Amino acid sequence: MDSTIGALVGLLLAIFLIIKKVSPAYSLILGALVGGLVGGFSLDEVVLSMVDGVKDVSSAVLRILTAGVLSGVLIKTGAAMTISNAIIRFWGPKRIYLALAVATMLLCAVGVFIDVAVITVAPVALSIGRRLEVPTPQLLLVMIGGGKCGNIISPNPNTIIAAENFGADLSSVMFANIIPAVIGLLFTVFVVARFFPGAASLRRRTEVPEIEEDENLPSLWSSLVAPVVTIFLLALRPLFGFTVDPLIALPIGGLCGILCMKQWKNTLPSLEFGLQKMSVIAVLLIGTGTIAGVIKDSTLKDHILGLLDYMSIGKDMIAPISGILMSAATASTTAGATLASASFADTILAVGVSSVWGAAMVNAGSTVLDHLPHGSFFHATGGVCDLTFKERLKLIPYESLIGATLTFCTTIMYLICR
């Protein structure tokens, strides 16, 4: 029991420090150290658990760093903006909710971080929203919902780390959540957005409000090359049995995009931007790995399994539940998926859950509470739309409902397919 208490103390300490604006990586490392000592481990044992935890995520960190090539290319060349503009033009103002949700979903699905995807789509969304008199919180909620749906089918860090820790193929984990993502998108657009308090009816318009053209943006077809090449390479394994590791597929996709957009001058800026973004995630994952190692060596997972038995809930439900709990602890999809998969993968696999569905359920569960105020996503998305803290806070129940829908659908898919 002591090691369980220690693990919980470590998590709570890390959360407290993060709320107090201490670096998340250092907060997690200190939480791991204190949690291990409180749990009865010797200093040497704690350090060994922390190092082992980092080793467990080291290969995923390498893949995530190389994923920065694709993400950097899409953002720095303007390809992400071109894709989002095209989607919004295509759907039109009468379907503005669907347009924004699809735009953000697709950007996330092709490898753009969810916060960056929201920031990319937000200027166009706010411009159209002002003309159609749609409340800004509602616009943000739709973008976040679409982003969450895209995040569970993307080659983003959360999916990479979950697949890596379960020993599952990345493309298989991505494909497993396609149906839940589509259901989540429809739920966001036609349920959550429509019944959001203060939701305004869209004016009837026959023309799309003008979207400012930027001559420096690449064409749509060239913008699509990078994500299409990446998805094709990742799809070779499930389709033809030929494996191209994400470490190779993601950079190749990005470089092909650079060539087709003829933006060679943006190659270095794109690489630097992608590396900068991914380095932040990589450092966070190292911190997360330390506390995951302590949790893995504690008896916390045994008590959770015992609680599931007591509540007559199947032990395989530890996959989505662990994702939910760890995303709440870290207020991050990536850190939540890392903690849950690194700490509970062996236990989840031992109760008979396949590696693909274990990773898919953890990944979906990590979207339920990743938007809490002690994380950066909450503040980044609220800031880009100029929402007050109170306004941003009001979106949390609806964001959680969208994440819960994704998790529920993934769990149902698992129960059907197992």
Image: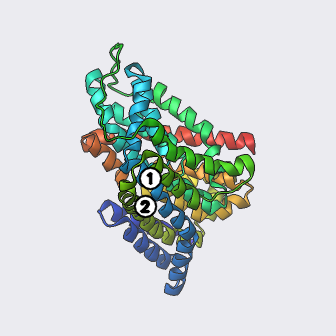
- Asked if residue 182 lies left or right of residue 259, the reply is right
**What label sits on residue 71 in the rendered view?**
1
Q: Residues within 10 Å of mark 2 (few under 14, many from 20)?
A: many
**Picture coordinates of residue 315 (x, y %)?**
68, 53
User: On the image, which quarter does residue 302 sit in?
Assistant: bottom right
**What label sits on residue 404 in the rendered view?**
none
- Asked if residue 279 lies left or right of residue 248, the reply is left
Q: Which residue is painted at 55% across and 60% down in the image?
A: 161
Pointer 2: what residue?
278
What's the coloring here?
Answer: rainbow
**Picture coordinates of residue 329 (x, y %)?**
45, 58
**Local SS, label 1:** helix
Instruction: Classify 145 as above or below 4.
Output: above
Foreground residue, 223 or 317?
Answer: 223
- Asked if one can make out residue 195 in the rendered structure from this viewpoint, the answer is no
Q: Which residue is painted at 71% across and 42% down in the image?
A: 415
Please name which of the two marks, 1 or 2, marks the residue nearer to the observer: 1
The amino acid type, in three-letter code, at marker 1 is: Ser
Q: Residues within 10 Å of mark 1 (few under 14, many from 20)?
A: many
Q: Which residue is painted at 56% across and 61% down in the image?
A: 247
Instruction: Classify 173 as above or below 142.
Output: below
**Local SS, label 2:** helix
User: On the image, which quarter does residue 197 sit in?
Assistant: top left
Q: Quarter holding the N terminus?
A: bottom right
Spatial CA distance of label 1 from label 2 is 9 Å
Foreground residue, 273 or 37?
Answer: 273
User: Which label's residue is closer to the chain start, 1 or 2?
Assistant: 1
Q: Quarter holding the C terminus?
A: top right
**Picture coordinates of residue 319 (x, y %)?**
62, 53
**Picture coordinates of residue 143 (x, y %)?**
40, 37
Q: Are marks 1 and 2 in contact (CB under 8 Å)?
A: yes
The amino acid type, in three-letter code, at marker 2 is: Met
